[in-house]
């Protein structure tokens, strides 16, 4: 697994496919969190939303690094375990998001005027991780393993992202943003955000199983 993760990191760095989602994340953070003040939960909702979009795009890029012949070689090299290859790509996306989470946690504090508590930081971590897991889940499901045509994958990804963002009351993303926008006390948000985090982990697991099922039938 570690070797596969290193291979995926090396490939994405060499192809520079991380640049577009990274620049998008930085741009959104700059627009949404600069010169903020007041309670921190709304600012961290902006950080989480930025990471949600970035993680979706980054995961799709990671899942599309290898064309079918090259992926077949990687799977054979991994002992024929295609699930291991899939999990390595997901792990690479998650590790990348963890790095971005640190930036999303401290950039608003640097550019704004906030009173920071440990509870605020914990809430920021929970919110960003929740959105990262959902973004990775969408990226996995909308990858080349499921959609052979990139146009269909793009439409599906946009539909899922828009639904997660704007479907009123839809957990975990829209519900999380609603809670963070209307509740200034971070301590009150920790428990419901933890529930949203658990839901996002379940979504990632379900989408991973569905992707592996489709990819396994094709391979």
Image: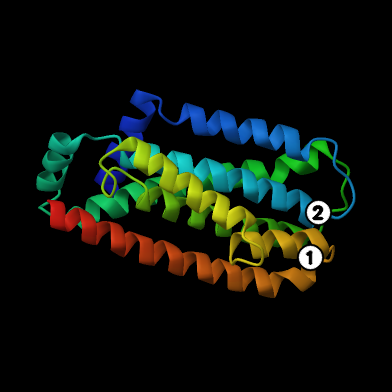
- Residue 156 in the image: x percent, y percent? 42, 48
Q: Earlier in the sequence, mark 1 or mark 2?
A: 2
The foreground one among 93 and 202 is 202
Q: Residue at x 35, y 42 (%)?
A: 152
The number of callouts visible is 2
The residue wearing badge 1 is 186
The foreground one among 134 and 160 is 160
Q: Which mark is residue 217?
A: none
Q: Is residue 190 above or below residue 66?
A: below
Residue 208, picture quadrant: bottom left
- Residue 123 in the image: x percent, y percent? 70, 61
Q: Residue at x 69, y 37 (%)?
A: 29
Question: Disc 1, disc 2: CB below 8 Å?
Answer: yes
Q: How is the image coloured?
A: rainbow
Q: Residues within 10 Å of mark 1 (few under 14, many from 20)?
A: many
Residue 11, picture quadrant: top left
Q: Is residue 128 above or below residue 150?
A: below
- Residue 126 in the image: x percent, y percent? 62, 61
Q: Is residue 5 above or below residue 213?
A: above
Q: Secondary structure at mark 1?
A: helix
The residue wearing badge 2 is 40
Q: Residue at x 44, y 52 (%)?
A: 138
Q: Residues within 10 Å of mark 2 (few under 14, many from 20)?
A: many
Describe residue 58's horizontal placement relative to residue 46 as left or right.
Answer: left
Q: Secondary structure at mark 2?
A: helix
C-alpha separation, residue under disc 1 versus residue under disc 2: 8 Å
Residue 179, picture quadrant: bottom right
- Residue 59 in the image: x percent, y percent? 41, 44
Describe residue 161's horizontal placement relative to residue 122 as left or right.
Answer: left
């Amino acid at each position: 697994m570690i070797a596969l993760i290193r291979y995926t990191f090396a490939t994405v760095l060499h192809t520079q496919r991380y640049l577009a989602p990274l620049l998008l994340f930085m741009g959104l953070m700059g627009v949404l969190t600069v010169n903020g003040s007041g309670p921190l939960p709304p600012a961290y909702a902006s950080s989480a939303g930025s990471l949600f979009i970035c993680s979706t795009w980054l995961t799709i890029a990671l899942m599309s690094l290898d064309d079918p012949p090259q992926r077949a070689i990687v799977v054979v090299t991994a002992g024929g375990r295609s699930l291991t290859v899939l999990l390595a790509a997901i792990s690479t996306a998650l590790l990348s998001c963890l790095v971005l989470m640190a930036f999303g946690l401290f950039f608003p504090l640097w550019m704004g005027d906030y009173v920071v508590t440990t509870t605020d930081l914990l809430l920021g971590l929970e919110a960003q991780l929740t959105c990262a897991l959902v973004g990775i889940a969408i990226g996995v499901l909308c990858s080349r393993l499921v959609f052979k045509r990139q146009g269909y994958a793009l439409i599906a990804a946009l539909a899922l992202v828009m639904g997660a963002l704007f479907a009123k009351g839809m957990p975990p993303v829209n519900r999380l943003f609603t809670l963070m926008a209307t509740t200034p006390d971070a301590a009150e948000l920790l428990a419901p955000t933890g529930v949203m985090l658990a839901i996002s982990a379940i979504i990632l697991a379900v989408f991973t199983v569905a992707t592996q099922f489709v990819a396994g039938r094709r391979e």
